[in-house]
Image: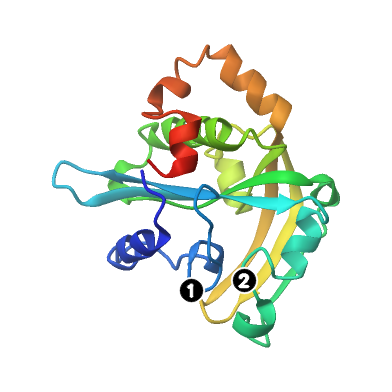
Amino acid sequence: MGFDFQEYISITQATPSKGPTFPNFRPDRSPINQGDGFWVLGVDKNNEAALLEAARLYDLTYTNFAEHLQSLKAFYADPTKHAHPDDRCVCIAPSAKSLVGKVAYLGDRWLRTDFRGQGISKIMAGIVRGVSYAMWAPDFICALVERQLINKGVVYGYTHHESGGAQLRLVENNIVEDDWLVWQTGEELRTLVNRHERGDLISAIPFSSEQAMSGA
């Protein structure tokens, strides 16, 4: 687990079978302040990358997730400087406008093909949610996912899903997607953690929320 996204990008770039990392996890496009993001790396017995996922916190006190996406500020700290002229994001999911306050966004998940179908994604979903809860106690936790993943039942932990989350084109990264919005309220996340008595989720976190915020 790490907090340095320069290191994260060096890992993803050295993982040839992983697709491009979205600019919202690239510090040269969207810097993440200390304590506002983390990433998880899983390795095999040869210490080679087998799983990657990242998370960051958006402060949407004065806006909402739909506006954040459509303005491209979800992806770039300064869209006028970093976005390509043909970049666009259309969000028509009605509930996206209700995602406000502290919104934890989980993304860039990648699992190597030889590790799929073994329940690893479900375990990781619990770990990443536990860390997000410990660090931020967010008002919402959300992601953008392809519909086929929802149909396959491999999107774990989210209570709600809705089409029209992001009709997205990011030219520099060669990203063209039509994603669904999946989300969970902060209260639902808290209930989930409490239901597991911090056994399945929080026991997997090797540090306290204060240590996480300090980058320890």
Query: Mark 1: which secondary structure?
Result: loop
> Where residue 196 sits in the image (x, y, percent)?
53, 14
Would you place residue 141 above or below residue 87 in this image?
Answer: above
- What type is the residue that disc 1 sits on? Asp
Q: Give the quarter of the figure containing the C terminus.
A: top left
Identify whether 89 is placed above or below 57: below
Contact, mark 1 vs mark 2 (Cβ under 8 Å): no
Q: Is residue 80 left or right of residue 16?
A: right
Looking at marks 1 and 2 on the same chain, the residue that comes earlier in the sequence is marked by 1
Residue 91 in view, yes or no:
no
Mark 2, other Cα within 10 Å: few <14 / some 14–19 / many ≥20? many
Residue topped by disc 2? 76
> Quarter-wise, where is residue 175 in the image?
bottom right
Q: Which mark is residue 64?
A: none
Q: How crowded is mark 1: few (under 14 residues within 10 Å), some or many (20 or more)?
A: some
Residue 200 lies, in percent from the top left, at 45, 19
Q: In which quarter of the image is the N terminus?
A: top left
- Residue 28: image tag: 1
Please, is residue 90 above or below residue 145 in the view? below
Closer to the camera, 12 or 150?
Answer: 12
Picture coordinates of residue 7, whole percent (x, y): 33, 60
* Type of the residue with mark 2: Tyr
Rendered image quadrant of residue 81: bottom right
Q: Which of 15 and 132 is in front in this view?
A: 132
User: Residue 72: horizontal and vertical position, in percent?
Assistant: 70, 70
Camera sees residue 25: yes
Q: How many numbered circles are shown?
A: 2
Depicted 216 relative to depicted 191: above or below: below
Please name the residue shown 84% across and 45% down the image.
98
Secondary element at tag 2: loop
Q: Would residue 139 appear left or right of 63 to someone viewing this image?
A: left
Residue at image position (76%, 45%) is 101
